[in-house]
Image (cartoon, rainbow, N blue to C red):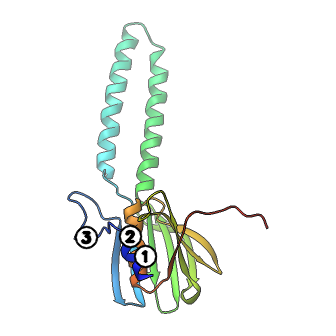
Amino acid sequence: MAQFLTSLVPVYNEETSPPGCTVMVTEVGRVSRKNACILLAPNQSLSLSGNLWVFVSLVAVSLGISIAFAFAGAWMVLPFAGLEVLLLGILLAYVYMQGTRREVIRISGERVVLDCCRGHRQESFYHREFARDSLSVLVRMGSSATEPASVCLTGPEGCLEVGGFLTDGERAALVRKLGDCGIIARREAGYKVQDF
């Protein structure tokens, strides 16, 4: 297993990440090998105020052009400009909310807890607990032989993908951090659909 974990390169962390890159896999606290907390967060490059500035500037341009056409006699442009502004607002809000997602993996003596939260208040919308001794990490390898395409926590409680928003290199860092905590990783070439 150690050879498999060391083959997952490049490993991104606070020291080795490229300049200007936000680290999406962060070990928040580690008391010992058996107790750790790993935070997974997508790269949110634009803050709420930045999103508002982009939205307001695009609305000003769109409505300014629409009003100019309306004064020239093409008043039918206004409803379509309003629809455009509405759709733009919905899409920017959706992208911003997806950027506030957080997945927290807490590893304690006998339990591994996954909490998923979203929004400014970081209210949990998903909570799952696994027994640590029966938990394993299933790593599905993609086209590259060194970087995983998906990482799933599997056990008798079920199978749950974590870090769906991570890049392949960041998933490799997650597998390495989980391996440092003593959670076994096994790699699969791909998933197969099987009827029962």
Lower sequence index among marks 2 and 3: 2
Name the residue at 55% across, 65% down: 189
Q: Say what secondary structure mark 2 lies in.
A: loop
Q: Residue furthest left?
A: 19
How packed mark 1 is, by other alpha carbons closer than 10 Å (few <14, some 14-19, many 20 or more), is few
Q: Measure the C-alpha gap from mark 2 to mark 1.
A: 7 Å
How packed mark 2 is, by other alpha carbons closer than 10 Å (few <14, some 14-19, many 20 or more), is many
Residue 31's place in the image compared with 72, above or below, is below
Residue marked by disc 2: 8
Q: Viewer-proximal residue, 175 or 99?
A: 175
x%, y% of residue 117? 47, 66
Q: Viewer-proximal residue, 165 or 172?
A: 172
Q: Measure the C-alpha gap from mark 1 to mark 3.
A: 22 Å
How packed mark 3 is, by other alpha carbons closer than 10 Å (few <14, some 14-19, many 20 or more), is few
Q: Amino acid at mark 1?
A: Phe
Q: Say what secondary structure mark 3 lies in.
A: loop
Counting labels gives 3
Q: Amino acid at mark 2?
A: Leu
Residue marked by disc 1: 4
Q: Say what secondary structure mark 1 lies in.
A: helix
Which quarter of the picture shows residue 31?
A: bottom left
Question: Which mark's residue is nearer the viewer, 2 or 3?
Answer: 2
* In-image side of 15 versus 65 (left or right): left
x%, y% of residue 45? 31, 52
Residue 16's place in the image compared with 157, above or below, is above
Q: Residue furthest right?
A: 196
Residue 92's place in the image compared with 173, above or below, is above
Which quarter of the picture shows residue 67?
A: top left
Residue marked by disc 3: 14
